[in-house]
Amino acid sequence: MPRTILPLLSLVRDPAFAQQRKAAREVVRYVDQCIDKGAATADVFGLDKLLTALESIRLARAEIGVTGDVATAFVLNTVAPTDEIETVVARRFGRSVADFLAGFRRVAALDTSTQALQTDNFRNLLVSQAGDVRVVLLLVAHHVYVMRQIKDNPQAEAVCRFSLEAAHVYAPLAHKLGLYRLKSELEDLSLKYLEHDAYYHIKEKLNATKQARDAYIECFTAPIKAQLDAEGLRYHMKARTKSIHSIWQKMKKQRCEFEGVYDLFAIRIILDAPQKQEKAQCWKVFSIITNDHESNLKRLRDWLTVPKSNGYESLHITVRGPEDKWVEVQIRSERMDEIAEHGLAAHWRYKGVKSSGANIEHWLADIRGALEQGDDSRLADSLAEKLQEDRTYVFTPKGDLYSLPAHATVLDFAYHIHSAVGNHCTGAKIDGRNVSLRRELKSGERVEVITSSRQEPKAEWEQIAVSSHARSKIRAAVKELGARQAVLAREQLERRLKNRKLAWEETAWNRLVRKQGYKEANEFFSDIANGRLDVNAIIDAYSNLLQADTAAQPVRRTSAEEYSLDQQQQAGAAHKGSDDVLVIDRNLKGVEFRMAKCCNPVYGDDVFGFVTVSGGITIHRTGCPNAPSMRERYGYRVVRARWAGKGGGTYPITLRVVGKDDIGIVNNLTSIISREARVMLRSIRLDSHDGLFSGILTILVENTDELGALVKKLGTVKGVKSVTRV
């Protein structure tokens, strides 16, 4: 018989695996047949891997309580050829073994880059890919066994990688499952290889202080034992030294040396009490200890009243002992201690822990109840199916791991990375194959988003996206794109109206927009830009609306007594000059306009209007330095304008005054301005050079008449050579 089969015979003969002897014999026959047929050799199957798998199964059986088909699948994962198809395994060993084997291989295929390992997302992904919690439990046991033997591995890189997996993946999973002893062992062993100097430094310190710790523990516990004995309680005590990993974490957190960690050990009092009296006796011990020792209430941890989600129950108190040292005391029952030490395996013997939940952490805690009741059907529930309703985990090409909602698409992933990536997404590349942005993602996939500068967000993308984040980004991007298109459409309409010699009246356009069934003007102009509305038809409708307004205006008849030739001539002149002219009036409604800061027009100046990109109108002086450029490049956006009414507002004007640098000239200028009732000086800046001064004055005036009068008065000041408007 080939030497590869010998370790499997021990699996068959081991009483611990009586329930799966038949399956184990099938594994033996299967491997034997493969080797006899020349399909593989003993080296291919890997004797060392096979032995490791068997020892991991024994550890899982002894310390966790896991056995059955999952153990057979774990052995098959080591010895089965990689091209073995699922149907063959299912036919030879049953569907359950095939499902377990698929779970082991999905986990093995995960990207274990360093940055991905150190996230909660990776642990969630691993559990979801495992498909069954027993796969996770066996993997935890496997890592514990390998970490115990890894010192003999000469490959430093492999040791580092396995230690990282133990520290960042399997130790946290063991903690959530209540496997506290295995969790501490994984943490300590991983620290030994990842932080070699720190590990041995703490270990040497612990060995050096062991004798002193033992003496202190005896001094502290002696009076407590006497009191507990007097109360007739059945118990035993043991001292638990803090793990090396915990000490190292505390040293880093508190930024202190080894001597600065005061809670290096804890006293554990374990009561032999009936389950109904456990809590009462624990609180009785609490009162005995706190009567004689000062307690630190900030460090009280009551996990009796409310156990942890993973089923952990205990009462932790910190009291001041001899030499003014703080000592942690843990009070629990035999049942609680067994659960804390051995986790899941303890539930084969004890009852009473209840926990439930749909997500990974709560559901892993609920496995305790399944093992407690021996309910394999609950253990067989697929974690992948449960998690499919919750999250999807995918990698970037660089190895970063992202968590997305269930059924997330490529488009969701693109917007999760960045809104700009989402807006220009055209698809993705998954496992070397191009896929559309509608493609639903699966956990464990590596996704490379493909973008194009020509791509623009579309409203129908909201039907593709699953996450609310992506949908909100799509709505915002579509709205912004629509606003830009609306500006372009408005400029297009303005050019068309100018060609047909039609004036732009904002109130008429607002009425036309509502008449077309739109609530917002941007949507209306956006549809024009997209070609959903015919521009010529819209202009015709606008022209008809203007004609209807003109025809509907009432004709005011004037009596002979009210008739005045001068008034009629003035009205005719005003009407003649009002064609295609923006009338600037403080009471004007429906048109947004403002004074240009480049030329600061004042009531009475010759002005024109310029339609801005945002849709408002800026009023410029005809002599504005920017006027020639605007007329040449954007003539279709220039609007004739004139003032109406009597003004009434104030306008900022900048004057440049040049003159001789004589004493008192500044006082003369400011005194003239201060005497003007309707003129206000806002700022003045002077500069003198070679006997001349140049001053920049900013004033507020109501109209050009006041400005002209002020300029004349300033020009009469002695020494002033010129006063000009900037």
Image (spheres, rainbow, N blue to C red):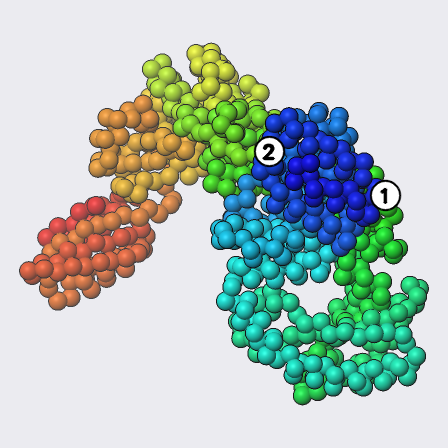
Q: Secondary structure at mark 2?
A: loop
Which label is found at residue 41? 2
Q: Residue furthest left?
A: 690
Q: Is residue 322 left or right of residue 269?
A: left
- The residue sitting at 54% across, 69% down in the picture is 200
Residue 243 or residue 159, whichever sits in front = 159
> Which comes sooner in the sequence, label 1 or label 2?
2
Q: Amino acid at mark 1?
A: Asp
How crowded pointer 1 is (Cα within 10 Å; few <14, some 14-19, many 20+) is rated as: few
How crowded pointer 2 is (Cα within 10 Å; few <14, some 14-19, many 20+) is rated as: some
Q: Which residue is mark 1?
A: 375
Where 310 sits versus 640, above or below? below
Q: Amino acid at mark 2?
A: Thr
Q: Residue furthest bottom?
A: 323
- The residue sitting at 61% across, 55% down in the picture is 149
- The residue sitting at 83% across, 39% down in the picture is 377
Residue 138 appears at what percent x and percent y? 70, 46
Residue 317 or residue 377, whichever sits in front = 377
Residue 549 or residue 140, whichever sits in front = 140
Q: Quadrant of the C terminus?
A: top left
Q: Is residue 437 left or right of residue 132?
A: left
